[in-house]
Amino acid sequence: MRTLSLAALLCLFWLVTSGRTEPLLLGFMVVAGAIVVLLSHRFRTVDAEGHPIHLLPRAFRFWGWLLVQVLKSNLDVLRILVRPTLRIAPRIVRVPTAQRTDLGRTILANCITLTPGTVTLEVHDEHLIVHALTEAAAVDVLGGEMDRRVAAMVQPDGAPVVRGGSA
């Protein structure tokens, strides 16, 4: 199932990015897709972590929520840029995480970095090191909502998310 999904995704990506449907280019698409799928099998990356199609149903809801968070953060950073009287208070915080897998930690770290005003600097098993532009951004990251939502998407077994940490 993952192999077919990977092949279909690669072909779809090729079609969307090239926009060309000439027979020769479609042949190249099939050959290139087959080579990537074969190499992926050889390197054993067509697994739940390398190609996480099992997350797709829950991912759409998460992406909608994340888009709203990115837009809100963009507005906050824009407010700081437009009104210089608003002071930034950069800080580095240690953010505890309940993610049990590398995939979960990677998704969480990338989502934090996608949100303007915060950047994940380091990823560890039990926590992340995050740079926040403002105190509000630091409090938001430490609040753990993003961690809970990533855990709900990646760990659907309902494993509890334990919070705690220091700023």
Image (tube, grey):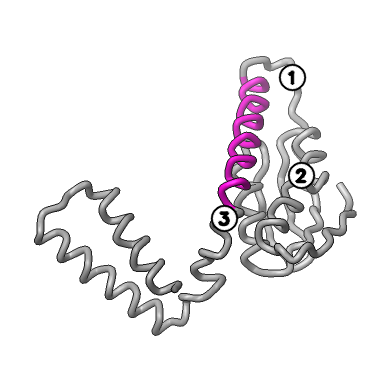
Snapshot quadrant of residue 43? bottom left
Mark closer to the chain start, 2 or 3: 3
Amino acid type assigned to the residue bearing label 2 in the image: Val
What is the x, y in percent for residue 19?
Answer: 22, 46
Q: Residue at x 62, y 47 (%)?
A: 62
Amino acid type assigned to the residue bearing label 3 in the image: Pro
Given this view, does label 1 or label 3 mark the residue nearer the observer?
3
Q: Residue at x 70, y 62 (%)?
A: 156
Which labelled disc corresponds to residue 69?
none
Identify which residue, 115 or 166, lies in the foreground: 115
What is the x, y in percent for residue 149?
Answer: 71, 51
Which labelled disc corresponds to residue 57?
3
10 Å crowding of disc 3: few (<14), some (14-19), many (20+): few
- Disc 1 element: loop
Snapshot quadrant of residue 42? bottom left
Identify which residue, 72 or 127, lies in the foreground: 72
Span colored in magenta: 59-81
Are the residues at dot 2 and dot 3 in contact (C-beta closer than 8 Å)? no
Q: Residue at x 84, y 61 (%)?
A: 160
